Amino acid sequence: MCSVPVIFYVNISEEVGQVDDESIIGLYFERDEKAVSETSQKYGALCTKIAMNVLADSSESEEVVSDTYLKAWNTIPPQKPKSLGAYLSVIARNLALDRYRKKKAAKRIDGSLVTTLDEVAQILPDNLDIEQLTEQRQIVERINAFLGRLPTGQRVIFVRRYFYLDSIKDISQRYGLTESSVTVTLTRIRKKLAAFLEKEGML
């Protein structure tokens, strides 16, 4: 049973688009409204995909994307993200998951998302407050360290599944793999992550 709508935050290794992030961030610092249109052009599809993966609702996802741009506008400055794509991804994901919480409370939840979250929730013992745990910088840093040691292909698959919340089918089609191969890879990585966190004294 899934009880955790937030897993953890990870460094994003995949970037999209051609526009220079520094130029877009510069527009935010200048309070130039063109920053939002440039953000939408470069990262709109990414934010929409993340929101849809969580909510499976185009109308709600559209609202999440709009809220993502608004939050970016309100937080840059003072924030100056090293990766605008990663920054927006975290905002979109968190906003979408906030809506997911409300849907879950109203018993209008997407079973596929529950399954995805359960896969990682099973790594950690039931007596931990996982939401609080994921907010601690220490465990975030250790998970990122673990991911950094994985071969690129495995790391990307893990991030697509548990950060972007892509389906197994989407991942297999995206990277030309069988669904069985993706499932086996994720299972092995989860076991390695659990062993790593235990060795690091996190469990």
Image: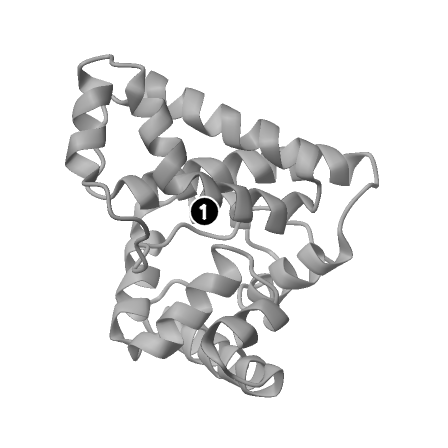
On-image quarter of the N terminus: bottom right
Report x, y in % for residue 188: 49, 83
Colour theme: one colour
Q: Residue at x 37, y 45 (%)?
A: 136
Check the image and report above or below for 23 versus 18.
above
Image side of residue 52 versus residue 65, left or right: right
**The quadrant where residue 168 appears:** bottom right
Above or below, comparing residue 26 to residue 56 in the picture: above
Q: Residue at x 29, y 60 (%)?
A: 13
Q: Outermost residue toward the right?
A: 107
Q: Residue 192, percent across and down?
A: 42, 80
On the image, which quarter does residue 187 sit in? bottom right
Give the quarter of the figure containing the C terminus.
bottom left
Residue 141, percent from left and from top: 28, 55
Residue closest to the eye, 180 or 1: 180
Q: Label 1: few (<14), some or many (≥20) within 10 Å?
A: many
Labels in figure, total: 1
Residue at (58%, 67%) from the top-left corner?
Answer: 170
Residue 181 versus residue 33 in the image, above or below: below
- Decide if residue 1 is in sight here: yes
Question: Where in the figure is residue 198, as x and y percent of width and height?
Answer: 40, 72
Q: Nearer the viewer, residue 35 or 121?
A: 35
Q: Is residue 186 left or right of 81 when viewed as pictured?
A: right
Residue depicted at 42% across the width and 73% down the height:
193
Label 1: which residue? 46
